[in-house]
Image: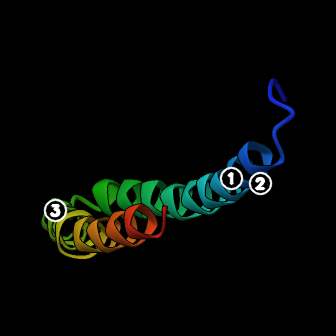
Amino acid sequence: MYNCNPAVVAMASQLMLLAAIYQISDSVQVIGSSVLCDYKDTRAIFFITIIAYWILSLPCSQVASRSVLSSA
């Protein structure tokens, strides 16, 4: 790491864990959408993506960012 500050190292390690979890879920999503696209079922991909990103992820990220900013 480029920083010896323990607080920075602790926060960076937590962010790296979140990035790893995101990579796993994103790879499952890419594989699933590719399978559905091969079956020529693009409507399902569209609705799953809208629900996953706009209905679930966006409000969750808003809540997470507000809780992190309020605790800082």
Q: Residue 69's image quarter?
A: bottom left
Q: Which kind of residue does numbered mark 2 sit on? A: Ala
Q: Residues within 10 Å of mark 1 (few under 14, many from 20)?
A: few
**Badge 3: residue crowd in 10 Å (few <14, some 14–19, many ≥20):** few
Nearer to us in this view, 44 or 3: 3
Q: Position of residue 48 (x, y in %)?
A: 24, 71
Find residue 63 and report its horizontal and vertical position in percent.
31, 74
Residue at 30 percent across and 68 percent down: it is 57
53 vs 29, nearest the viewer = 53
Q: Are marks 2 and 1 in contact (CB under 8 Å)?
A: yes
Badge 2 density bin: few <14, some 14–19, many ≥20, Cα 10 Å: few
Amino acid at pointer 1: Met
Residue under label 3, please give it: 46
Find the distance from the CA under tag 1 to the CA under tag 3.
Answer: 35 Å
Determine the CA span between mark 2 and mark 1.
Answer: 4 Å
> Which residue matches tag 2?
10
On the picture, is 62 further left or further right than 35? left
Proximity of marks 2 and 3: CB atoms separated by less than 8 Å: no
Task: Residue 47 in the image: state x and y as whole percent.
Answer: 15, 70
Q: Earlier in the sequence, mark 2 or mark 3?
A: 2
Q: Which mark is residue 37?
A: none
Residue beneath the point at 29% across and 55% down: 37
**Percent position (x, y) of residue 56?**
27, 76
